Image: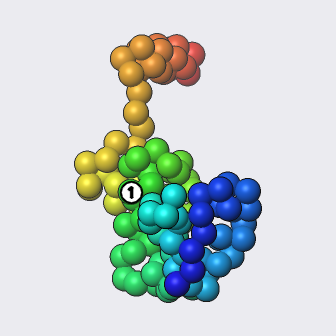
């Protein structure tokens, strides 16, 4: 286990990330543990059944990754990832009322032209 203080993490984050690939890194804030960094690839955590999909789903749900990037992380085709998050009740498209109205108007115009 290795430690890095917050200022060291701020000044050289790449060193802490490299260290996390080999071992657990504890981030210290004024002599108190504040966070833990764990390298996902080296710990083979992403190789565990369902871990990659669960992480990608959580990151998409919380807005950390786009739909396409989440599907790539999950190693699923986009359509399969859309079906997966839809089954979980996670909205694939989040539009407010004004955006929805504009989209419907655009669709109506497009249909009128065809």
Q: Position of residue 103 (x, y in %)?
A: 47, 21
Q: Residue at x 47, y 78 (%)?
A: 46
Look at the image and name its color scheme. Answer: rainbow
Say whether residue 56 is visible. Answer: no
The C terminus lies in which quarter of the figure? top right
State the residue position of label 1: 58
| Residue sitting at x 53%, y 66% | 27
Q: Quadrant of residue 7?
A: bottom right
Residue depicted at 49% across the width and 64% down the height: 31
SS category of the residue bearing label 1: helix
Residue 97, quarter of the rendered image = top left
Q: In this view, does 15 lie to the left or right of 109?
A: right
For disc 1, the neighbor class at 10 Å (few under 14, some 14 to 19, many from 20) is: some
Q: Position of residue 15 (x, y in %)?
A: 72, 71
Residue 79 to residue 48: above or below: above
Residue 67 appears at what percent x and percent y?
Answer: 50, 50
Q: Examine the rendering and report whether any part of residue 8 can be seen.
A: yes
Nearest the eye: 20 or 57 = 20
Is residue 110 positioned above or below 22 on the image?
Answer: above
- Foreground residue, 89 or 60? 60
Instruction: Tell me which residue sits at (39%, 59%) in the image.
Output: 57
Q: How many marks?
A: 1
Residue 66 is left or right of residue 90, and the answer is: right
């Amino acid at each position: 286990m290795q430690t890095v203080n917050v200022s060291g993490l701020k000044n050289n984050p790449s060193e802490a990330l490299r260290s996390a690939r080999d071992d657990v890194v504890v981030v210290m804030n004024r002599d108190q543990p504040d966070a833990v960094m764990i390298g996902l690839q080296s710990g083979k955590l992403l190789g565990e059944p369902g871990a990659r999909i669960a992480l990608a789903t959580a990151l998409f749900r919380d807005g950390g990754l786009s739909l396409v990037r989440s599907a790539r992380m999950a190693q699923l085709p986009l359509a399969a990832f859309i079906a997966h998050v839809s089954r979980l009740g996670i909205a694939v498209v989040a539009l407010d009322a004004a955006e929805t109205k504009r989209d419907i108007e655009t669709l109506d115009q497009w249909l009128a032209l065809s």
